Image: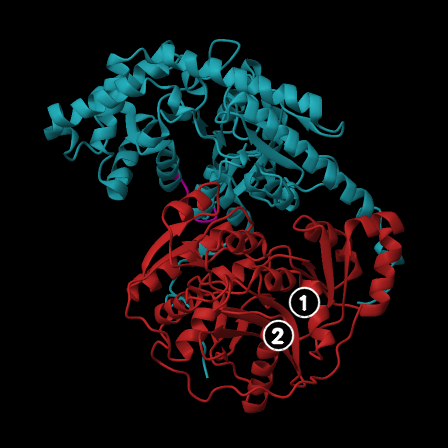
Chain colours: A red, B cyan
Amino acid sequence: MQQAGATAEPTPTVPAQLPEESTVDSSSSFRAVVLAGGLAFEREVSMRSGRRVSAALRHADIEVEVLDADAQLLPTLAGQPCDAVFIALHGASGEDGSLRSVLELAGVPYVGSDSTASRLAWDKPGAKARMAAAGITTPEWVALPHSTYRELGAGAVLDLILSRLGLPLMLKPAQGGSALGTVKVSTVQELPEAMIGAFAYADTVLIEQFVSGAEVAVSVIDRTAGPTVLPAVEIVPQSGVFDYAARYTPGMTEYFTPARLGDATTARAADVALSVHRTLNLSGLSRTDAIITDDGEVSFLEVNVSPGMTDTSMLPMSVAAAGLDLGIVLADLLRSAAMPGRSAGSS
Amino acid sequence: MSGTRLDPYSGRYAARTHGMTASEIRALFAVVSRPEVVSLAGGMPAVTALPLDAVGSMIGDLVTGHGAATLQYGSGQGDLRLRERICDVMALEGIGGGADEDASPDNVVVTVGSQQGLDLVTRVFCDPGDIVLAEAPSYVGALGVFQAAQAEVRHVPMDDDGLIPEALRAALLRLRAEGRRAKFLYTVPNFHNPAGVTLTVERREQILALAHQFDLLVIEDNPYGLLGFDRDPLPALRSQAAERVIYLGSFSKTFSPGLRVGWVYAPVAVREKLVLASESQILCPPSLTQYAVARYLDTQSWEQQIKVFGELYRERRDATLDSLSALMPDEVSWTDPGGGFYVWLQLPDGLDAKVMQPRAVAARVAYVPGIGFYADGSGQRFLRLSYCYPEPDRIREGVRRLAGVVESELELRDTFGGIDPATLHGADTP
């Protein structure tokens, strides 16, 4: 259980103007593989991300093949080598570092964070602990496996947690995305059922103090000139909860890009996103989700190494708000990942 | 400053689209298509058991030899030759003889699957707010049609012998006391979807007697009636009460769901309205698939093929029931279908099939949570297993995985289910 203190690192600078054109040599032909699908809970979202990414890349004159992460993948990559892979897989395998480890073993370049960094970012409690240690504020939390509750008595353990964190709480599977299994608990009566629901998605459940405020998503892209923070997206779900339906049903959530934060808070949010990206050794692209508290504090929730790319996803909104073309940005990331001398997973 | 909702059509949608949102359950089903997952979810017929070469050659000939008709518009009511053959099929369940003097191809309306037939019937009879009676549970596709028509569904309980006549009487009396009436009763009497049970002959008579007494129209949806394992088909409700029952039939289970051919068999007055409603909806059913079904019935031993399907499904039903008996915890119970595609399973008290679904997907087994088969949000303890598609070995593996999932959920219930929230810190917080 940890409570983070104030930001200790120097404030990174947000570029005043982002480059509109490709920053990477794009003169030669390029063949990319987009990985989409998989067996995780987010397969459907991943398929949509994959379709959007491949369409954007084709628009940028990149030859694209979309492959599922199945038993045909490695033979296909061996038989028809590509210049680099874009991972549009969400959830386990795509984000937990396992697939990235295999690509590293196979020597296949890919966009994004390497397996070690992904593994750390994927685990919400682990990422929160690292960020808290780095001085980034994050809601106070407890993360325990089912076995702990079973062995010590769920009532006694939850009573301790409640006495420390109070109500309301956010319950989240320790790993996973798209808010699957995430629920807000406002009364103790709701807690037992909510615990059972969250444990259906993961063996460990993160219980987090609920922090009220504006929800924002801050994306970072890292082409050749170092990580760049894109305009933050402010998320205002109609129902008040940014759950699965609110994320993927057009009309159920209002998005403001750039977020209505004011210059100082905008800079702090960018600061946090950049710190997360650097502290966790992320590369290529990342999306940090945070709450801007009523007193303007930026509270880190989680980071995604394979951000959604669907029609309702936030990273593409940020790219557009920055005046960039999604296809060119993604093509740059692929070309950067494929550069000679680059290790797999870098860009 | 305004943001974007990513939907420029917000504010224009009809009220009936309320609730059409992205769903976690639907998202979880995306993995079902992967071969690693044993899907006991979808009711997909085993179409590879068909004589595919013969069917392919037959359909090829329909295009090359008869394209002027098969690729052209057709009658709004459907092709006459097919309607004649549909009468032959219905005769197997007693329709068209005895008291049914009305039996005639003239009273058959061919539809795009029986799903369109149900939609037409509902459009013809239901205004927003009207009441429809339906079994508890009911076919999820029917509930979708009723919801789209903005009808109010009132469920009537069923047991191992199908719809309970006493419960139907009670429901009708309640309506009468409210000064209201049901537009119709929707029922799947044979090998029910999702419950797998069949309405007994005795109860058929009782329910028809109630229909007469309360002037109730009955919609008999019968896609599975010919797929019994242990006995000849029971007489259709329609065969006992020609003016009281509208019958929905389908070739999706006895031939092919990909052709989308079904029908409505209705009294004359209703038939006319159904034809007009169908013409405004789809102009005419597809000619090519109608000719394909008619040709199949004319040239292939279709009754023998139904027996082939029945034997195949019986073997899969047995694999399902044997595995459930061997592997499921004691507190789990299920129905014993005598035909059709489905077993309806009841989980132990405190378990919720929808909540359990992510764990099942992680274990690579899929089912349909029971809540989708109820219009009133109940059914949490139930789930539907379909045995029609996977091979018996896969079924056994799927049930083994599912049993492990149920065991894990029982552990969770034991851990968290016994908590008294009143003893927790913050219990007095409003």
Label of residue A276 in the image:
2
Q: Nearer the viewer, residue B33 or A327?
A: A327
Does residue B33 sit above or below A136 in this rendering? above
Q: Is residue B281 left or right of residue B345?
A: left
> Going by the image, does A173 lie left or right of A147?
left
Q: Evaluate if marks 2 and 1 touch, with contact meaning CB atoms under 8 Å apart.
A: yes
Q: Is residue B46 left or right of residue A235?
A: left
Mark 2 vs 1, N-terminal side: 1
Amino acid type, mark 2: Val
Q: Pick whichever, A106 or B125, lies toward us.
A: A106
Residue B240 x %, y %:
44, 16
Residue receiving disc 1: A127
Q: Residues within 10 Å of mark 1 (few under 14, many from 20)?
A: many
Quarter of the image for residue A281 reads: bottom right
Instruction: Let me know if residue B364 is in the magenta part.
Output: no
Relative image position of residue B131 (x, y in whole percent) = 50, 42
The subunit carrying tag 1 is: A
Q: What's the residue at 37%, 74% (across, down)?
A: A24
**Residue A143, percent across and down?**
76, 60
Q: Which residue is located at x 34 percent, y 16 percent?
A: B89
Of B146 and A101, the residue lying toward us? A101
Q: Tell me the magenta residue range.
A: B125-129
10 Å neighbourhood of mark 2: few (<14), some, or many (≥20)?
Answer: many
- Look at the picture and state if A233 lies above or below B412: below
